[in-house]
C-alpha cells in the first residue's frame, strides 16, 4: 500500500449539538477524536485541524483553518499544507466506529483503482457517500482547491464532488457519525452492546 497521510477536520461549530465540543465527547471511555486517531495509526502524518487538545495519541500535528470555524474546505486547505504523501485520507472527527481495517481498505482501494480515479469514498448502508471517510489523491485535492479560490464557508462536496471516484461499501457499518445528541446516545448504546 502506498504511504498515506490523514487530515481530521475537528474545528466545526457542532450546531446540532448546541455548540458542544464534538471531538471531545465520549463513546465508552474514549473521545470521538481519540477513536478516529486510533484508526489512523498507519498514516505517515496525521493532521488534526481544529483547536489543540489532549489526545491519547502522540505525534499528531495540529493546525487551524482560516478563519477558525471556516468550514470543511478551509480545514482541508489548512491540513494540506502539512501533507506530504501522494494519498491523503479525510476523516471526520465524529466517527466512533472507524477502524484501521477500513482506513487501510480505503487507501488500498485508491491504490488499486488506477490513476484515472482520484478518490475512494466510503458509502454507508443507506447509499450515501461519505466524503469525510475517503481517500484522495493529494494532487487532485490541491488542484480542486486552487480552482475554488477562497475556501472559507464552502461545502466539502464543492471541493470533491467533481473528482472521479470509486465507491467503497461500508461493510462494517463504521461510517456512523454523531451529529446530534440522539446519534451520540445511539453510538453509546451500540458501543455498550
Image (cartoon, rainbow, N blue to C red):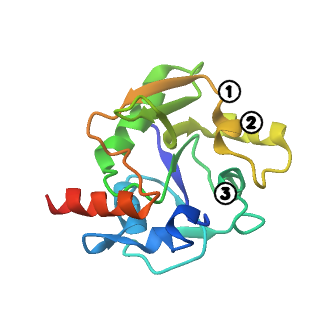
Q: Nearer the viewer, residue 18 or 90?
A: 18
Q: On residue 144, which mark appears? A: 2
Give left or right: position of 145 versus 76: right
Considering only order in the chain, which callout, 2 or 3, is on the residue closer to the N terminus? Answer: 3
CA distance separating discs 2 and 1? 9 Å
Look at discs 2 and 1 and give the one toward the viewer.
Answer: 1
CA distance separating discs 3 and 1? 19 Å
Can you give x and y, in whole percent of width and height, for residue 18 in the image? 54, 71
* Above-or-below relation of 1 to 82: above
Q: Are marks 3 and 1 in contact (CB under 8 Å)?
A: no
**Disc 3 element:** helix
Q: Are marks 2 and 1 in contact (CB under 8 Å)?
A: yes
Considering only order in the chain, which callout, 1 or 2, is on the residue closer to the N terminus? Answer: 2
Residue drawn at x 47%, y 68% is: 23
Q: Nearer the viewer, residue 123 or 63?
A: 123
Can you give x and y, in whole percent of width and height, for residue 52 in the image? 56, 77
Q: Which residue is mark 3?
A: 75
Q: Which residue is mark 1?
A: 162
Give left or right: position of 66 versus 161: right
Can you give x and y, in whole percent of width and height, for residue 27 in the image? 30, 67
Q: Nearer the viewer, residue 46 or 164?
A: 164
* Above-or-below relation of 27 to 96: below
**Disc 1 element:** loop
Residue drawn at x 38%, y 44% is: 175
Residue occupying the far right of the picture: 149
Considering only order in the chain, which callout, 1 or 3, is on the residue closer to the N terminus? Answer: 3
Amino acid at each position: 500500500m502506498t504511504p498515506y497521510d490523514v487530515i481530521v477536520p475537528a474545528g466545526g461549530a457542532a450546531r446540532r449539538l448546541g455548540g458542544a465540543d464534538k471531538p471531545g465527547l465520549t463513546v465508552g471511555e474514549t473521545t470521538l477524536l481519540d477513536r478516529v486517531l486510533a484508526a489512523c495509526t498507519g498514516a505517515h502524518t496525521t493532521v488534526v485541524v481544529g483547536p489543540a487538545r489532549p489526545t491519547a495519541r502522540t505525534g499528531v500535528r495540529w493546525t487551524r483553518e482560516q478563519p477558525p470555524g471556516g468550514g470543511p474546505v478551509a480545514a482541508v486547505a489548512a491540513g494540506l499544507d502539512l501533507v506530504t504523501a501522494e494519498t491523503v485520507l479525510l476523516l471526520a472527527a465524529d466517527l466512533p466506529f472507524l477502524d484501521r481495517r477500513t482506513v487501510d481498505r480505503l487507501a488500498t482501494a485508491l491504490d488499486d483503482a488506477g490513476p484515472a480515479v482520484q478518490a475512494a469514498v466510503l458509502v454507508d448502508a443507506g447509499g450515501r457517500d461519505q466524503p469525510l471517510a475517503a481517500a484522495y489523491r493529494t494532487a487532485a485535492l490541491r488542484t480542486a482547491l486552487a480552482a475554488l479560490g477562497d475556501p472559507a464557508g464552502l461545502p466539502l462536496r464543492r471541493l470533491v464532488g467533481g473528482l472521479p471516484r470509486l465507491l467503497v461499501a461500508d461493510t462494517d457499518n463504521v461510517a456512523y457519525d454523531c451529529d446530534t445528541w440522539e446519534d451520540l446516545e445511539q453510538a453509546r448504546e451500540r458501543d455498550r452492546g
